[in-house]
Amino acid sequence: MKIRQYLTSSIVLTLLCSFYVISCSKPDTAAVDACAGKTIIVSGSITQTSGGSSTNGSISVSATGSNNFTYSLNNGIAQSSGTFSNLSAGNYTVTAKDNNGCNGSQTFNVTASPCPTIIITATSTNATSPTATNGALMANATGSTGLSYRINNAVFQASGSFTGLAAGSYTITVQDLNGCTNSATFIVTSNSCPTIMVTTTTTNASGPTAANGSLTANATGGVAPYMYSKDGGTTFQTSGMFSNLTAGNYTIISKDANSCLGSSGSVAVANNPCPTITVIANTLGSDKCTNNNGSITINASGSTGFMYNLNGGTFQTSNVFNTLGTGNYNIVVRDNNGCTNNATAQVPVKVAGPQFTNVKSIMTANCSFSGCHGGANPQNGIDFNDDCTIVSKSARIKARAVDGNPSIMPASGSISASDKQKIIDWINGGGQHSN
């Protein structure tokens, strides 16, 4: 009698288990992906540094797509605040991570404010003879604050006074409190030398980085022949013509037959005005659930020899940037003369594709409800109301709703042949949210 009761209970339990397995999908012991369906986007603002080598830049960010974020800079120590201060100019990657370890990142370019133009002038005191070392230079600079001075790469000092100098050429460098600098070369001569005058004519470079400017110097007042130097008197040449110059300030030193020196003072080689570079960015969105297949194609016109930069990265010859996530991007286009123009572009989230929309409708009608894969407690933590869960479980959906014999999903029984084909078509088309 006890054996009969035991067998009867076992048969009933087996039938009940079979019934519940058929009514919905089997329990899944696989770990639930806490990040499925989350797209964490990091955005923020940048405060540029005050220029030079200063470290007073900052980045302030926030994140969306989840909550309880911590933030880290360049994979450093995480912090609750999204503000990072005391930064020098450069590229920084900020990562936001929620309490489930789901994260998103964005790269920011902290730029430096343009350095001011520091103007250096100096008065010289001659040495009493060609071999004496009692000459002097008194330098004065304007154009910035917190200025310090040095001569010929010596240590910086607060004063622009330099004494105990022999006849010769000297380079004085001035630095402001932000590390911005400028240099100029000056002559200390001796009482026995005549005053040698150096005049110059210049030809502009064709752009900020072009090296096709030139400078021609001519000396008078001493004893011919003259020699000329543009590196502070380190090396001299017989010609006063200097070619292949970039835009900048140059000081030409002339030396006569008796080694008496004269200086042109600071001479500027300018660059021609840059052309107007037009930048147009065409974007392709990134898939909502993959978030790394967007792209930006940049079309530039108005000059030649373009190179392209995205978010402060390395310049490249290709105008196409692939494998991009959703978000805003900064673009810089540079021509072969160093002329630039900037633009911004946004990689959007791709809209749901028609094949995915068909599959979601099937899930909504058959599985995405309380007691199955929906509601407050979806079975096995798999919620088919979430688009990206559907994408991540495409193989499971096919195995259970299409390939099962009989089908073990949905609870209502097998879906129609038409709906099965829609699932197959979506998976064969890529199985993404945008397909």
Image (tube, grey):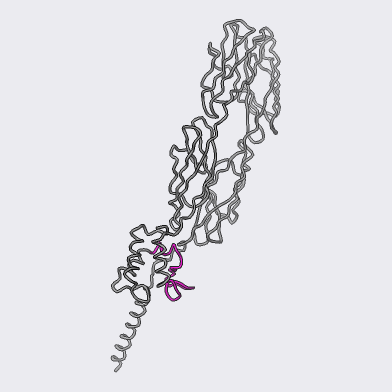
- Is 377 on the left or on the right of 21, as rendered? right
Q: Is residue 104 above or below residue 174?
A: below
Question: Residue 174 appears in which quarter of the rendering?
Answer: top right
Question: How many marks can you see?
Answer: 0
Residue 381 in magenta stretch? yes
Instruction: Tell me the residue at 61%/19% (across/down).
Output: 251
Q: Quadrant of the C terminus?
A: bottom left
Residue 408 in magenta stretch? no
Q: Quadrant of the N terminus?
A: bottom left
Q: Main secondary structure of the magenta part?
A: loop
Question: Residue 49 appears in which quarter of the rendering?
Answer: top right
Q: Is residue 426 above or below residue 218?
A: below
Q: Is residue 325 above or below residue 25?
A: above
Instruction: Tell me the residue at 52%/44% (across/down).
Output: 311
Q: Position of residue 217 (x, y in %)?
A: 58, 14
Q: Position of residue 22 (x, y in %)?
A: 34, 77
Q: Single out the residue that lies furthest toward the top.
A: 223
Instruction: Tell me the residue at 41%/69% (across/down).
Output: 363
Instruction: Tell me the residue at 58%/16% (across/down).
Output: 233
- Is 394 on the left or on the right of 85, as rendered? left
The part of the chain drawn in magenta is: 367-393
- Is 28 on the left or on the right of 47, as rendered? left
Q: Nearer the viewer, residue 307 or 246?
A: 307
Q: Position of residue 416 (x, y in %)?
A: 33, 71
Q: Position of residue 243 (x, y in %)?
A: 52, 19
Q: Nearer the viewer, residue 227 or 420?
A: 420
Question: Residue 407 appears in which quarter of the rendering?
Answer: bottom left
Q: Single out the residue that lies furthest toward the bottom.
A: 1
